[in-house]
Image: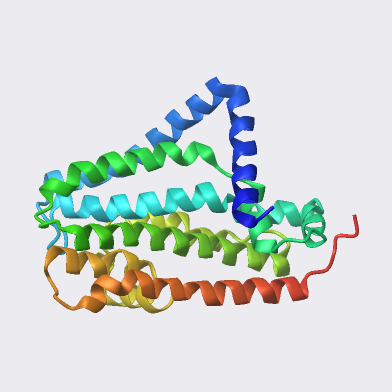
Amino acid sequence: MNSLKLYAEYLSLHLRERMEYKKSFILELFGQFLVSFSLFLSIYFLFQRFHSVAGFSFSQVLISFSVVMMAFSLAEIFFRGFDLFPQMLGNGEFDRILVRPRNTVFLVICSKFQLNRLSRVLQAIVTLLYALPRCGIHWNPAKAGVLALMILCGTVVFGCLFVCGAAVAFFTIEGLEFINIFTDGAREFGSYPMAVYGKAILTFTTFVIPLACFQYWPMLWLMGESRNLLYALCPLFSLLFILPSLLLWKIGIRKYQSTGS
């Protein structure tokens, strides 16, 4: 069985498992929607007081919000196994993964899907559809493609952050809370364009943790603030973050000692 078919089979198993308790699943979806809706309300009330933030209008900020929310939520759905990885180390489940004839990253991805985050994806889609015709951007196929690239590459970047957090657990056994600064924290302050937080943060989120590469810089190109094509291609540059993430993962595996269970 090839990897794609195996992945689809794992996803199907998780979906059937959740559908065994439909009411519980629906309530979880509703709860997650309310949690993420509070972020939208904070932006709404801010713009009731101020008409723009760092030169961005309400609808333009909503695009940034939607891109980050959708990317983070998709990463939670498909990379949740890494977020729970310290538990896998503690109960010996990772030892079983090591003896299976598949890539360890692939098997950890398939170990858990957080399907209740679909409600956050839905909210991001609704918010994006509201903002698109009101943001002042003249849309064409190229700009629509860049927007899709922002979401796709953002999902990969957040997924890599989950991988980094899991790799750290090889050395600490337990997960470290500071990783949440770059995952849940990034979802929070990513609701606004990165330039809002100052030059130091913008530089850090461009060259170290490439959040601005899929959010702020391509937004400037979409808005017509810059004609530099490199800004539109910045989401692709953010994919370079895959390399240090996988390197950290491989170093962690080399240092890993079995639980012996």
Which x, y percent locates residue 242? 51, 72
Q: Residue furthest front?
A: 1
> Residue placed farthest to the right in the image?
260
Q: Is residue 93 left or right of residue 222?
A: right
- Residue drawn at the location 14% of the way across and 56% of the way down: 139
Q: Position of residue 158 (x, y in %)?
A: 47, 60
- Expressed as whole percent of the image width and height from the top left, the position of residue 17 reads 64, 31
- The reply to whether residue 182 is in sight is no
From this view, report whether residue 34 is shown above or below residue 43: above
- Residue shown at 13% from the left, 43% from the top: 48
Question: Please, is residue 211 above or below residue 19 in the view?
Answer: below
Return the residue nearer the eye: 205 or 141.
141
Q: How many marks?
A: 0
In-front residue for pair 94/52: 94
Frontmost residue, 141 versus 69: 141
Q: Is residue 227 left or right of residue 79?
A: left
Residue 44 lies left or right of residue 164; in this view the side is left
Which colour scheme appears in the figure?
rainbow
- Where does the C terminus fall, quadrant-wise? bottom right
Q: Quadrant of residue 141?
A: bottom left
Please state the horizontal and vertical placement of residue 229, each as a whole percent of the image: 21, 76
Residue 260 visible, this angle: yes
> Compared to 261, does 161 lie above or below?
below
Instruction: Give the left or right position of residue 205, taking residue 87 as reference.
Output: left
Q: Residue at x 31, y 42 (%)?
A: 125
Q: Residue at x 27, y 60 (%)?
A: 145
